[in-house]
Structure formats: structure tokens, C-alpha cells
Amino acid sequence: MNTDTTPLPSHVRLVEVGPRDGLQNEKQPIPVADKVRLIEALAAAGVRHVEAGSFVSPKWVPQMAGSAEVFARIERRPGVVYSALTPNLKGLEAALEAGVQEVAVFAAASEAFSQKNINCSIAESLARFEPVMAAAQQQGVRVRGYISCVLGCPYDGEIDPARVASVARELDAMGCYEVSLGDTIGTGTPGKTRTLIDRVAREVPRERLAGHYHDTYGQALANVYASLLEGVAVFDASVAGLGGCPYAKGATGNVASEDVLYLLQGLGIETGIDLPALASAGQRISDLLGRPNGSRVARALLAARQ
């Protein structure tokens, strides 16, 4: 484990997952035009990596229907990565046809979660990714890996960090350029987060790890800071805290991008993102959805403007 005297990263990359991981958990359907407007507003605010959609069956994730049209309609800014989730070869082929230049695959650190979420074991899920990885590499498309339930599972409870490290090692060996560690149910705490990263970093270098924290128990920002102390410099976040946690009724989901950005700015860490512009984008989509803005920072900033 790094000591608290270890210098914090000077720059952090935020991966904005609101248009995918956020919107897919919202109850009401979102028109393509509104998804496009949100993605373009995020890029205009300085976000350099936007997860813009998911090529999965609309039967399973109806909110992600129309992802191909989203990619066709967004005005792509130079230097911005617009990525998509592709769980299988069919999804990858659809993403490639839509001109997606980076994709993501996802596995779990919990056998029970893997079975209930994608109806197969962890080993089977990893085997499914092999043709996806091969095809992506052939097309020059980068692949990012996600691991769910790294700090707890709704079915298995505590998760052994060694199991997370094993899955991360497999994703890294397959060719994922980065592995995002997801606290899917938001039960992780800073001490456990640091222990986890320390263990996973024995298999995958810290510079190829990212943190993905949900705020169900109010620990997400603390876990981001704990990760910074461990040398992690990439974090997934969702504008306005879009999304929920399907395993904890009424609970919040993804940590809000605005809140993470405010923390980073307070630490003197560069991101290249304009916080007021980001807050405005989050408020627009919150108004559209008829839901409260899930970012405390955004609510404070917007209230101060009035």
C-alpha cells in the first residue's frame, strides 16, 4: 500500500458514464435527440472520454435502444473518445458499423452476480470476450474492461481482493488497455478500497487501473480520494449522479461527475473540464427526466447563480 506521503496524481482523466451507465438505469425512455444533446454538452464542457451508448439487446436494456443513431448524430470533437459497451461479438460488430472507436467489456468478481446478471460463470464470461478482443484488435479498436462487485456483492457479500485481482489479470492479458474496478453496490470504504487496489496492482499496473464508485452508502468520494492515494488517476463518474442502484431500493448510484471534479479541483489536480458548464449540462438532463439533480456540488453552484 502506498503511504500517505505519496504525491497525488497531477492530472486525472474522468470517464463520463452518464449517457450509458446513468441513463440505462433511468425509468423513462430518453429520445435520441436528448442523448445527443447531453453527449455534446459534456464534450463541450471539456470531458475527453464519454461512454455514449451500449450495443446490447433492447430487450434487456431498453434505454440503450438507438445507440447506433446516437453515434451517427453526435458531432465528434477532436481529442474526445466516444466509447460504447459491447458485451459480445454481435454487439461489437454493430458498434464497428456505427463507427465506434473504443469499446468496453464487463465481467464480475462475484460468481453469483455473474450468473444472475449475464447467466454464466466468470470463466465463461471471460471466454466470451476472446472473439470480441480478437476482432477489436484486428480493427484497431481499443478495449476497456470493467469488473463489477469488486468491494461487495448483493448475493455473495464480501469479495476477496485476490479474486478481483485474478479477473483483472485475465482482462489485462486479453488486451484491455485499462481495467475499471466497480463498486457496484456502493458498500466499499476507503480502507478496503486501498487494500483492493494494492492487491490488484500486483497483477495490473496502477496506471492501467480506474475507479468506478457508487454512492449508495455515501462513500464514493472518500473512495476516490483513497484511490488517488494509491496512485489511480482515472475515474468513472456520471453527470448529475444519473442512474440508480438496482440492488438497493431507493439508493443513489454512480458518483456525480461534478462532485468528483470539485474534489479534484480542491486538490489542485487538473482535468481540463469546466465545472459550471458540466453542472449546467447535468441540470438540463435532470430537468428533462423530471428528477432531482444528484450532484450536491451542482445544486450548490446553480443555487448560487440565482
Image (cartoon, helix red, strand yellow):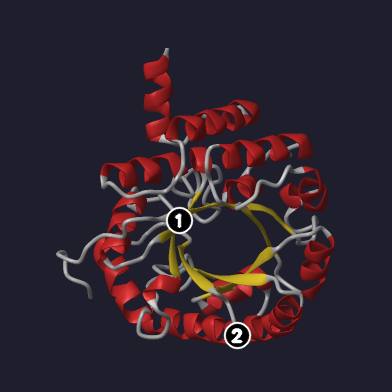
Residue type at the position of mark 2: Met
Corner quadrant of residue 114: bottom right
Residue 86, disc: none
In depth, the one of 141 and 292 nearer the eye is 141
Which tag, 2 or 1, sits closer to the chain's start? 1
Residue type at the position of mark 1: Arg
Picture coordinates of residue 209 (x, y %)? 43, 70
* Residue 189 visible here: no
Picture coordinates of residue 136 (x, y %)? 72, 76
Circle 2 Cα neighbour tier, 10 Å, few/some/many (<14 / 14–19 / ≥20): some
Apparent side of residue 292 relative to residue 304 in the rendered image (left or right): right
- Give the residue at mark 2: 174
- Residue in the image at 54% along x and 42% along y: 242
Picture coordinates of residue 67 (x, y %)? 77, 51
Task: Tell me: residue 178, above or below residue 17.
Answer: below
Apparent side of residue 237 relative to residue 133 in the rendered image (left or right): left
- Give the residue at mark 1: 13
> Which of the image's four quarters has the C terminus?
top left
